[in-house]
Amino acid sequence: MPSILVLNGPNLNLLGTRQPEVYGSVTLAMVEQACADHAKSLGLSVDCLQSNHEGALIDAIHAAKGQHQGIVLNAGAYTHTSIALMDALISVELPAVEVHLSNIHAREPFRHVSYISKAALGQICGFGAHGYVLALDALANHLKEAGAE
Ligand code: DQA
């Protein structure tokens, strides 16, 4: 069964209480449970990880090689700053889908730039927690088309 790493970056541990008017009231635990449930229905398994530290996120991406067949990544604010995370994604050559709860293109100009997009199959943003489910659908379809299932 293909396995997907669902990786969340800085401040996403605060989901549910952090700016609910922007990010919604769903907690990270609820997001991760929804991912596990939806993955099961797609014939996938998930491992979920969150870190506030750039290096730990890079280590998790490196460790995904050989363990997972794809990555769902919400890199939080590192999206807009981290060439190192982009390089890590490019290095492991795993299909990745970028997720943001908010519509980053409708927000401040500094959020319009994503280094992650340069290394991802595509980006899903603006659909709140449902974006993670959409990302799993996109990865499942990609893996199917690539013949990995
Ligand atoms: C975010 C958007 C980022 O700009 C922000 O820094 C986050 C969350 C989102 O999910 O909408 O931490 O990635």
Image: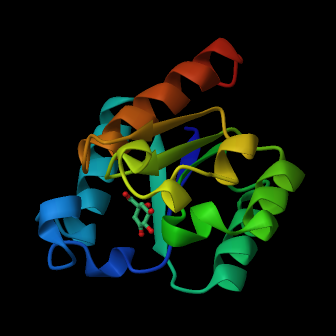
Determine whether 89 is above or below 58 in the image.
above
Query: Which of the two residues, 94 or 13, is positioned nearer the viewer here?
Result: 13
**Residue 86 in picture, x, y percent from top left:** 76, 57
Seen as rendered, the residue at the extreme right is 91
- In the image, residue 105 lies at what x, y percent? 43, 43
Q: Is residue 92 left or right of residue 44?
A: right
Taking the spot 84% from the left edge, 49% from the top edge, the residue there is 90
Which quadrant of the figure shows ligand 1?
Answer: bottom left
Q: Find the residue positioned furthest to the top.
A: 145
Picture colour scheme? rainbow
Q: How many marks can you see?
A: 0
Q: Residue placed at 70% from the left, 16% from the top?
A: 147
Residue 84 lies, in percent from the top left, at 80, 69
Residue in the image at 59% along x and 18% along y: 144
Instruction: Using residue 3 as the reference point, say whether residue 31 is left or right of it.
Output: left
Residue 135 horizontal side relative to residue 25, left or right:
right
Q: Quadrant of the N terminus?
A: top right
Quarter of the image holding residue 125?
top left
In which quarter of the view is residue 60 placed?
Answer: bottom right
Residues 29 and 73: in front is 73
Is residue 28 rendered to the left or right of residue 39? left
Measured along the vertical axis of the image, is residue 84 above or below residue 42? below
Residue 68 visible in this rendered orientation of the protein: no
The front one of 146 and 76 is 76
Asked whether the viewer can see residue 127, the reply is: yes
Q: Residue at x 44, y 37 (%)?
A: 124
